[in-house]
Image (cartoon, rainbow, N blue to C red):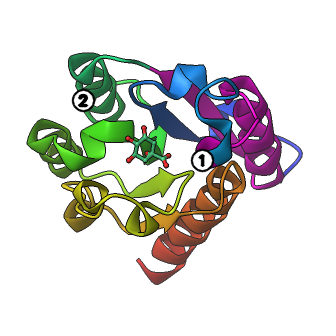
Amino acid sequence: MSATASSQDHKTILVLNGPNLNLLGRREPDIYGHETLRDIEEKTRERAKQFNLDVIFRQSNHEGELIDWIHEAGFAPKSRVKGIILNAGALTHSSIALADALSAVKLPCVEVHLSNIFKRESFRHHSYLSPVVIGMITGFGAFGYVLAIEALAYHLNHKQSSS
Ligand code: DQA
């Protein structure tokens, strides 16, 4: 970073968490682990800092609120969001509206799941989001968010140097 660089120069990553993820730590820990969403937020911020990325970390149980945040990231005039990490919870398997919002904003998005959705019930095997994201990280627990930061950082740098 140059001496004059400030957080003004940092790119921002929006990390969105969908329904029931506020219960992490208490919710089926055999599947989702013992870490809370706050623990995951800390890990995510720590890794992002190493790439000079700022993080906006949010959770909602409401589909519309998640969609509003995606719109804001993509279209608000002052938005500095350059990429999205999304664990949409069960909305992954049902929400065409979330997929449409991601398509509309055209920001690179990494889909994250704590559990390996392909090892679970068949209704979890289909994601409406996968066709509109750059990739999916599934089954690595909380570490998946750290991997998603690395994937987005790589993607953003790669895009910059190749454009
Ligand atoms: C999840 C997987 C979804 O199938 C489930 O509905 C969730 C969490 C995961 O992180 O493993 O709420 O997205």
In the rendered image, which quarter is residue 124 located in? bottom left
- Locate the C terminus by quadrant: bottom left
Res. 95 visible in picture: yes
Q: How many marks?
A: 2
Q: Residue at x 46, y 82 (%)?
A: 162
The disc at residue 71 is 2
Relative to 40, 58 lies left or right: left
Query: Is the C-beta of the residue carrying label 1 under 8 Å from the nearest atom of ligand 1?
Result: yes
Q: Which residues are magenta?
A: 31-59
Q: Secondary structure at mark 1?
A: helix
In the rendered image, which quarter is residue 39 located in? top right
Nearest the eye: 119 or 69: 119
The disc at residue 4 is none
Figure check: 54 above or below 111: above
Where does label 1 land, which residue? Answer: 31
**Residue 151 drawn at (x, y percent):** 58, 67
**Residue 134 drawn at (x, y percent):** 37, 68
Q: Residue at x 58, y 21 (%)?
A: 23
Residue type at mark 1? Answer: Ile
